[in-house]
Image (cartoon, rainbow, N blue to C red):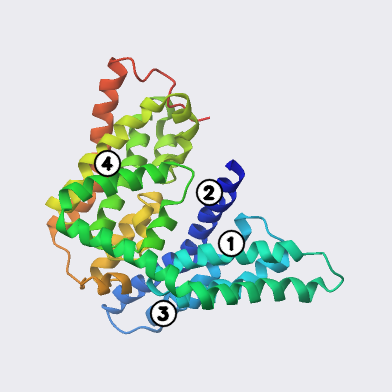
Amino acid sequence: MNRFVKRYLIDALSGMAQGLFASLLIGTIIKTLGQQLLRLGSNPIFEFLVSAGNFATDGHVVGAAMAVGIGFAMQLPALVLFSLVAVGSAANVTGGAGGPLAVLVIAVIAAECGSFVSKKTKVDIIVTPLVTILAGALLTVLFAKYIGMAASSIGNIIVWATKLHPFVMGIIISVLVGIVLTLPISSAAICAALGLVGLAGGAAVAGCSAQMVGFAVLSFRENGWGGILSQGLGTSMLQMPNIVKNPKIWIPPTLASAITGPIATCLFKLEMNGAAVSSGMGTCGLVGQIGVIAGWFSPSEAALKHGASAISPTTFDWLGLILVCFVLPGLLSWAFGNMLRKMGWIKEGDLTLQ
């Protein structure tokens, strides 16, 4: 069971997230940059940035990137890995809004089919890609649409429930997605698969930021500025070995996320209307915040389907983004951390990064 979880959930999801980052996410950033620069006036360079972003965010390209990322993380034979380009492209486009989940399921199964015959015949260069692509194509035709619909439906329910009950759902989403971010599972891939945008996406950004900034500030006395950068702009997953030793160190950033989540949804109405994958990135490379900003000016297709529209952000919007993602997570985690240190629940060295 442990091997199954590591290979098909941890490794595959992590690879999928990297594929999303290298296509949809970076493409959205490039395109948004070009679009904003074009507001200053027409320029071939700015137009090129928009075109480059469009190339990277094309559904076929994104699907192929996710599938290759999954295959690379699973350490597949070369011919299987390369064949997943076609499988991922087909699954993502056929899966529609829930395409990322379709890619994950179908790419994993097709990859195992290809791996089963890999290097078993003298005509491996024909047999392996043939089996991989045919298995992936058959699964795509039979199931991709329905896997995508299921993922999209779950995401729609979460987005709808967050609009209906922003306080409660703000807490739930912020805490759960933040915890997943720190675990060795890809919160970005999960948010992308479910299409978490709007207020739900904003709550996810709040929760992820609370974990990353929270642990960075909480462990400053042990790890200094290096810890601020590696956790605050890198990943809170670095604390997992310490969490295993003393789970109580997880309390401060998790409590912080329970507070910042509803503040994001109820007070500042913080929405993630950029690429859904950004909802699960937090402050990693500031991708979560860039996604929010991109959504202000150019909402993603998923966000548009939920009624989003481009806005001109106000000072209140910028203040909310800064407070929810940086100031409050740091202050709250620091305060809760001091309480737990005085109670003896957190001791000196408990948060030291190895």
Mark toward the viewer: 3 or 1: 1
Tell me which label, 2 or 1, sits earlier in the chain.
2
Tell me which label, 4 or 2, sits earlier in the chain.
2
Q: Are marks 4 and 2 in contact (CB under 8 Å)?
A: no
Mark toward the viewer: 3 or 2: 2
The answer to whether one can see residue 28 in this image is: no
Tell me which label, 3 or 4, sits earlier in the chain.
3
Q: Disc 3 and disc 1: Cα gap in Å?
A: 39 Å
Q: Disc 3 and disc 2: Cα gap in Å?
A: 39 Å
From the image, tell me which residue sits under label 1.
108
Q: Disc 1 and disc 4: Cα gap in Å?
A: 33 Å
From the image, tell me which residue sits under label 2.
10
SS category of the residue bearing label 4? helix
From the image, tell me which residue sits under label 4.
257
Vertically, is 261 above or below 201? above
Tell me which label, 3 or 1, sits earlier in the chain.
3
